[in-house]
Image: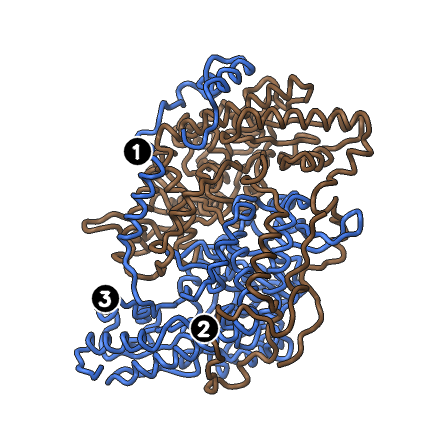
Amino acid sequence: MKREELIFEQSRPGRRASTHAPATLAAIDDLPAAVLRETPPPLPEVSELQVVRHFTRLSQLNFSIDTHFYPLGSCTMKYNPRVSNTLAMLPGFLARHPLEPDNHAQGVLESLYELQEMLKAATGMSGVSLTPMAGAQGEFAGIAMIRAWHLSRGDTQRTQVIVPDAAHGTNPATATMCGCEAIEIPTGPDGDVDLDALRQVVGPKTAAIMLTNPSTLGVFERRISEIAEIVHAAGGLLYYDGANLNAILGRTLPAGMGFDVVHINLHKTFSTPHGGGGPGAGIVAVNARLEPFLPIPIVGKREGGHVWLTEADRPQTIGRLSGFMGNTGILLRAYVYMRLLGAEGMRRVSGYATLNANYLCVRLAAAGFTIAYPRRRASHEFIISLKDIARDTGATAMDFAKALLDRGFHAPTTYFPLLVPECLLIEPTETETRQELDAFVQALSEIRDLAIRDVGELKRAPQTTPVRRLDDVRAARQLDLTWQGKPRTVN
Amino acid sequence: MPFIPHTDDDLAAMLQTIGVADIDTLFDEIPAALRVSGLPGVPPGMSEAAVTRLMHGRAARNTDSLCFLGAGAYEHHIPAAVWELATRGEFYSAYTPYQAEASQGTLQLIYEYQSMLAGLVDLDVSNASLYDGATAFAEACLMAVRASRNRDSRRVLVARYLHPLWRKAAETLLTGQAVELVELPSADGRTDAGALATLDAQDFAAVCLPWPNFLGGLEPVDELTDWAHSHNLLVIAVCNPVALGLLKPPGKWGAQGADIACGEGQPLGIPLASGGPYFGFMACRQALVRQMPGRIVGQTLDIEGRRGFTLTLQAREQHIRRSKATSNICTNQGLMVTAATIHMSLLGSEGLRRVAAQCHANTRSLVGALTSLDGVALYFAPYFHEAVLQLPRPVAPMLAELAAAGILGGYDLSADFPELGQGLLVCATELRTAEDIEAYRLALAGALGMAVAA
């Protein structure tokens, strides 16, 4: 089985990739000894070829969209077009210092301005700020704007943020970061929010409700207009978590549903890379009442060109969220993707994402799997519950996930949302072929047959990956977070 | 249809399997009144060739300059191999390594990164990254308040000469939790350690010390660290990672060392790129690890006893702890950390030290060249790779004139720090040559209306 030594273990004293640093050590005689480092940092001493080989080999230990079907629910693992990366990495974009004059960066600013305009169109909102660096930061910006709006009206008591029990963990965590309290409400048996429960919790302390629509249960919240009425009538605002925008792009608009603010994960719907855990981009779009509070900077258009708008232009802004202007390079990748697709292409995204999900859902149901919400139309994702199989055979959702890896598929999201037992949340995305989906049905069916026939064998999965199942308890109890090799000699 | 692989036959067969006539029917649970038929306001799609031409045009509309501007983002050499490797599809198009067995490449790489970063700052543990330097600074303040031994305090002391934009970002992020930043006394471009007696230390959870500070200056970190620890304050080091190739690491400050280190990772192989994506780093003492935000990777064993890597201590995080998590962060800056790990591997400790020393030496040369002009003076020394010059005329019009001549002359300090007068922050990294510096000297002389010998 493949394995790769740590780069530190390949290190030998005195070996260097010398072309990347000055040939000699420059004089530092004016710096007092008290400010200097006494021992060198423990970086590896390796050649350039060793580095290239090591990281190439490490990359080969990963599953990725480029190598595997990756139906990770709620993460929208669609193809990331190569051209988005190629164009965002043109030297003319990479060389821009963030503090250089606006007139040096007109090509960047014009692209970002047009991106803002397209995102307004895609959400139905009137204002956009591109600066949040991930979905969770977009959530922070949204709730902070809602708080600022209430406070601007002298409404100081509104500190409760309502979240359905199916919400992403970032929603309640965001409420806490904004100094608010998360109030959880249950979901009804049909997957829609329990409206009676909602009516009971709204009141003079309600700041907002945070909703994902379609929800993390993979169904469209049909009574969204009624929810909007209830929350608005109580004086609260509506926050749209755009994690699932891929399902409705060009079909319905968050603004039309009654939302006041929305964040969009560009690394999901607009296909910028997930990069092994980021960087993302969590842009926010708002209606007119929240527009003055948008985080800065924002790109403005003036006679003579595009400019960064700051506090001076936006005195009521909630402020900055980053040192400069967020993940600009990711924004450019999303811009390229959106220009490639255009309006029709965007509508096709939601159409084919939903087609693939419903096809997979129907085929898995026909193969005997339990669909969590069988009477509902699947959105771009859906949930199967393995509760019955687990009861009958002892095989868990985790076992299925690991067995999928052996069959060349990345696992769906497991054990989320929390309210469906032994669940797999499956999101195929629009960029997969029917043949890939068929192969996935075949694989899940084989795993189920194996569970019935020999659950012990199933629990030995995965067997073809670089490592077998890992001891998570040991990882947490005997913490080993950094390499503790042989200490280096003192300089 | 860009990126959608369905043939007409596929479509027909799939619709038949589902039992609907067309794709639009799949949206029948959306109330009719809420449906839209398209996205007016989004232009029609383009071919890859057309978009390529468009973006080449946009890139060419930007203007390249000779860069003497730092102020939190630095132009360094980035080996070609860094981004060749980081953009391999297996890194670029993977996600957060939840399925550890299928993500050993990313996980081992993060473990190596954590080891390098912790070694660089000389603290026990590192997380897998935060968004950028400013948010890492804000998260460090929140972490210190959670961990503080001065339990009731929600106030954090911060050096005056910390990046002003980071301060503003942190204020946005700290307001909700009522954490307040209070400025330390300062004099001559750094914290005035002699004036600490005026503070009631019990009021504070921590002290934040930039290294070097925003002006390039070297704070009295040993003295401040010992003072802070004697009053039960935690010490947060806010540091430039390239500078740590040369400068004393936070873990060695004072008698006990700093408790938390954070900063902007951009100088480690990340292009300037209009300000992002960069990455924030954070490291701390082992005792504080359960208060640290963000993902952490640990080494463990698989069922056959082989070494493997996995996300660990997840009970701190939002997907487990929800409203009681240490932070709401989920997606971080993984690909940037991939690049930085490759970058640090290529430089090694000797390479990083030479880069740091060369930056310092080049900035010394720059200061020497510019202060040879009448009326231009150095504000203070020692400094690392940025220095404050006093100009005989207002800075802004001078910078505009230099920019028109193709030189990014530095950062105008007069609005943020009026006590520095007509202050200009200049920077010369290892990439600036003697010819570059001479070009700046001549251009500045021209802007000042002086005739100088070339």
Cα distance between the residues tagged 3 and 1: 36 Å
Instruction: Judge whether residue A146 can be spotted in this image.
Output: no
Q: Give the residue number, with chain letter if any, for mark 1.
A: B43
Q: Which residue is mark 2?
A: B213
**Which three-letter amino acid code belongs to the residue tagged 3?**
Ala
Task: Specify the subunit that label 1 lies on.
Answer: B
* In this view, A378 is above or below B128: above
Q: Nearer the viewer, residue B412 or A18?
A: A18
Name the residue located 46 percent from the left edge and 57 percent from the top edge. Answer: B278
**Colour in which the image shows chain A:** brown
Letter of the chain shown blue in the rendering? B
* Disc 2 to disc 1, C-alpha distance: 46 Å
Q: Is residue A420 visible?
A: yes
Q: Nearer the viewer, residue B169 or A15?
A: A15
In which quadrant will I find the N terminus of chain B?
Answer: top left
Q: Nearer the viewer, mark 2 or mark 1?
A: 1
Q: Which residue is mark 3?
A: B400
- For mark 2, give the secondary structure: loop
